[in-house]
Image (tube, helix red, strand yellow):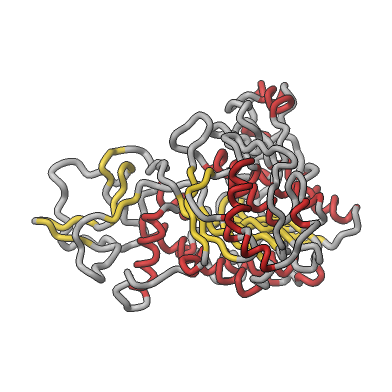
């Protein structure tokens, strides 16, 4: 969700409302603090989602394709995890402090962005035991899905998304797609194990796999909630069924997640991912991508309506961008999914690479409908999918300590702001002393400098490096792709 995607989605929203579009705004456009995030990895100029999620959720830059581990772990190196992955990701920090934690996503719950919250692996593709190479199995590496039952994963209060296939055994049919079976080769049913773990610890746990079972869950009677609404990824919003056997929207999941976690008086951390923006871009289907952004915007609004913004830090950002461009000299109000005529019409939106490549001479798009969900925008270079790109992405923040997002930051800086703001960092001394709002206002720029000083290339933090004490009212954090309540 890079700058081009945000701009195009903003215009698309306005045009759906019957306006020219350019003058409008998305909910997070109006957040008071805006910055940029540099998304490169230790070993790649253009990133994948696993390494970038590790940056903002774990505080270190990592190698391409790895998640929840430090920069000394190379992709596929199972043995290195045992000796070189001593980092603490944000969910673990929050759990140590007694906060509720969770995530909702429209991807598989074992996918690259949410997984660093609870899993450590040398390869993002090791989502289930069926995906582990023999060498990794022999080396004792654990698949990502199994780590949902690990020390951090088992204490996530809310887990919602898709991806049942990596949690169910290959002997058991999927509850919605009876022709499909789980993929686990070890015979484990992780859904049953998840429920049993909560029952053993005498918690009230609920599991949902469709809209009906989701709607039946009463948040006030729920300590832990697991929602797995698809065999693989959840559906695009444009394809989502509203029937009882359908699945909830991202906004509905966010609303229920917060309702479950708000019972914790110490606050909560919630990660929210609109994952299918990325998938639509990979397919070169721009309308799908833009409407997934609008779906995510509804999730932002749902979060804002559920919390007290005086004590909740909300951060909206992206793990990476895509090479979407808004080109031509289109006039004001020209349909963003439409065409511009330069001797022959061509689409305003296009990609640098992807499956939408058309060979020369360029095709005549007269009478071609270009605003459908399946239309593939043109690509300059032919490739199987649209790639990511290395452009900086936006950080939009509101709530306590949002002022610490103020310039162009390393991506792992996000983690350090969250941990500092919620008093979960290495010292926390700033939360033990001065709590005068006037002091907070007069020292805000110095505090940002303090954090920058201790946030090094690989996110290493020196204990005792805080130089300024600040008043903190943070109760929770929401990161969309976050949320933190302090």
Quadrant of the frame with the C terminus: bottom right
Q: Residue at x 28, y 45 (%)?
A: 379
Which quarter of the picture shows residue 58?
Answer: top right
* Rendered location of residue 321, percent (x, y): 43, 48
Q: Residue at x 88, y 56 (%)?
A: 199
Residue 214 visible, this orientation: no
Q: Residue at x 80, y 62 (%)?
A: 266
Instruction: Tally the numbered discs.
Output: 0
* Rendered location of residue 87, percent (x, y): 71, 36
In the displayed structure image, the side of residue 170 where residue 346 appears, left or right:
left
Q: Is residue 187 or residue 195 the one in the foreground?
A: 195
Which quarter of the picture shows residue 65?
Answer: top right
* Rendered location of residue 430, percent (x, y): 74, 54
Residue 467 visible, this orientation: yes
Q: Residue furthest bottom?
A: 18
Q: Residue at x 47, y 54 (%)?
A: 394
- The vertical placement of 310 against 66, above or below, is below
Q: Is residue 97 or residue 336 the one in the foreground?
A: 97
- The vertical placement of 171 against 287, above or below, is above
Q: Is residue 394 or residue 366 the one in the foreground?
A: 394
In the displayed structure image, the side of residue 395 where residue 57 appears, left or right:
right
């Amino acid at each position: 969700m890079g700058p081009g995607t945000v701009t195009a989605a903003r215009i698309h929203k306005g045009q759906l409302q019957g306006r020219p579009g350019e003058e409008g705004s998305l909910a997070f456009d109006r957040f008071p603090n805006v910055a940029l995030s540099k998304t490169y990895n230790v070993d790649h100029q253009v990133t994948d989602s696993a390494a970038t999620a590790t940056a903002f959720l774990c505080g270190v830059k990592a190698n391409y394709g790895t998640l929840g581990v430090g920069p000394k772990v190379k992709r596929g190196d199972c043995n290195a995890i045992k000796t070189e992955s001593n980092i603490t990701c944000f969910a673990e920090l929050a759990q140590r402090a007694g906060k509720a934690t969770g995530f909702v996503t429209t991807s598989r719950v074992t996918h690259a962005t949410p997984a660093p919250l609870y899993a450590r692996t040398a390869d993002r593709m090791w989502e289930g035991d069926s995906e582990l190479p023999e060498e990794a199995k022999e080396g004792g590496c654990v698949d990502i899905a199994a780590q949902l039952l690990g020390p951090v994963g088992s204490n996530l209060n809310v887990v919602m998304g898709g991806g049942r296939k990596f949690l169910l055994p290959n002997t058991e049919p999927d509850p919605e797609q009876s022709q499909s079976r789980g993929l686990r080769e070890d015979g484990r049913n992780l859904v049953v194990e998840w429920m049993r773990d909560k029952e053993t610890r005498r918690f009230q746990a609920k599991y949902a796999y469709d809209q009906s079972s989701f709607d039946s869950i009463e948040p006030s009677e729920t300590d832990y909630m697991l929602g797995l609404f698809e065999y693989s990824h959840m559906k695009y919003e444009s394809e989502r069924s509203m029937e009882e056997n359908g699945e909830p929207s991202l906004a509905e999941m966010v609303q229920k997640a917060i309702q479950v976690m708000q019972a914790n008086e110490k606050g909560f951390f919630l990660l929210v991912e609109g994952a299918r923006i990325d998938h639509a871009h990979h397919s070169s289907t721009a309308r799908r991508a833009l409407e997934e952004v609008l779906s995510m915007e509804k999730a932002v609004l749902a979060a804002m309506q559920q919390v007290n913004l005086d004590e909740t830090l909300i951060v909206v950002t992206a793990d990476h961008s895509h090479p979407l461009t808004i080109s031509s000299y289109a006039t004001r109000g020209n349909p963003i999914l439409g065409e511009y005529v330069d001797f022959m019409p061509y689409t305003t939106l296009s990609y640098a690479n992807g499956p939408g490549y058309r060979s020369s001479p360029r095709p005549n798009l007269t009478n071609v409908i270009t605003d459908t969900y399946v239309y593939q925008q043109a690509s300059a270079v032919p490739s199987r999918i649209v790639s990511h790109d290395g452009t900086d992405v936006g950080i939009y923040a509101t709530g306590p300590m949002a002022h610490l997002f103020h310039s162009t930051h390393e991506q792992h800086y996000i983690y350090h702001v969250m941990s500092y703001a919620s008093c979960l960092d290495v010292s926390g001394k700033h939360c033990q002393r001065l709590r005068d709002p006037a002091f907070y206002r007069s020292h805000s720029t110095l505090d940002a400098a303090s954090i920058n000083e201790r946030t090094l290339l690989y996110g290493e933090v020196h204990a005792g490096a805080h130089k300024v004490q600040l008043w903190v009212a943070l109760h929770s954090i929401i990161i969309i792709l976050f949320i933190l309540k302090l």
